[in-house]
Amino acid sequence: MKLVIKNIGQILSGKIEDPIFEGDCLIAIDGKITEWGKEKDLDTEGADTLVDAHGVTLAPGLIDSHIHPVVGDYTPRQQQLHWIDSTLHGGVTTLISAGEVHMPGRPKDVVGLKAMAIAAQRWYENFRPSGVKVHAGAPVIEHGMEEHDFKEMADAGVKLLGEVGLGTVKDGKTARQMVEWARKYGIQSTIHTGGPSIPGSGLIDADMVLETGTDVVGHINGGHSALPDDQIICLCESCKAALEIVHNGNERAALLTLNTARELDKLDQVILGTDGPAGSGVQPLGIMRMVAMLSSLGNVPAEIAFCFANGNTARQRELDVGLIEQGKSADFVLMDQAQHAPGKNLLESVQLGNLPGVGMTIIDGVVRSERSRNTPPAQRLPEIIA
């Protein structure tokens, strides 16, 4: 199946070292990117799906690095249906679980937590709400787990750990041992950072984060309560892990993290999440709002801020999405400057703090949504021609 998108106004690459690509046309075959550039130089014949972008911007689909799903497109925490579909309308095409912690009666015994992790991985592998890719099945580590438990989960397809610190394991030595077992079997880890977020969680300070050595410093700006400034700066200085900034955290701490990472030449480690559904609710536009906030208040070019939301996360999370690159999944968001929003173009408008209007999302080369029901209306909209 061949997808051709023509008349693209601008291609954002997701690559922080080269964020804007030349070209007005992109082609994907069987859900994978094959080529892009000037339409006159490409083979656009025989398209099964032809999209006229009408001059809007194309970017890799956005990635939410930190969600707490439960089952299907439903969250009991907020009693809300179709939150994932709403998130798609915010330009997000991939979601990554930091633990299915809001499941009522979540099992905390070793047998039960393994069973739920495997089940969650399976049900989101078998069911993709509105086509969105949900990487789930992220068990929260508990006392009593041994190396063979991590091997068993990995053999069954589990690739993530839920936030370290949300379970009974709250000391760095025990957590580090379990994180190392997980890493041995290809399971990526995230740690809760900051004050307690739900009953049963606790303070995770910089010392424990550093001792545990996870792959991702989860919500470094707090979820919700952030660490003191000196500890955030210490983590930025000391960690080679991904520095995850979330919508549901402390905005001031988010800007401190951004500014510190920039001073340390570590912007490539910055990734974004929402940390929802949670007590703050569901944020369908949370990732887009983080891009606009960090760009405007953090004085970051918008094309770089978008990389925090796709390419950086894809690289840190080892995903086949989030980048305009041959062989990567053809997951895109097509967007334009919102109607009557200040700024000369989409990027300038975003850097002034405004949300763009999403006109279309595409996952695996298939159009999944058209004009967004959640973003402000865009000046121009892409159109399916054939």
Image (cartoon, rainbow, N blue to C red):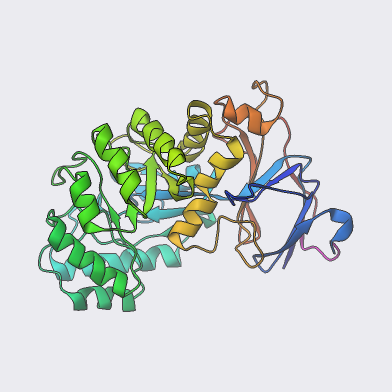
In-image side of 235 versus 33 (left or right): left
Above or below 378: residue 173:
below
In-image side of 122 versus 334 (left or right): left
**Point 33% across, 35% down: residue:** 249
In-image side of 300 versus 111 (left or right): right
- In which quadrant of the rendered image does the C terminus lie? bottom right
Seen from the viewer's position, the closer of residues 365 and 251 is 251
What stretch of residues is rendered in magenta?
Answer: 44-50
Can you tell which quarter of the image residue 120 is in? bottom left
- How many numbered circles does the render carry? 0
Q: Position of residue 8 (x, y in %)?
A: 76, 45
In-image side of 232 versus 317 (left or right): left
**Point 28% across, 65% down: residue:** 117
**Point 47% across, 35% down: residue:** 290
As for residue 108 lying within the magenta part, the answer is: no
Seen from the viewer's position, the closer of residues 117 and 301 is 301
Q: Position of residue 137 (x, y in %)?
A: 33, 63
Q: Position of residue 335 (x, y in %)?
A: 65, 39
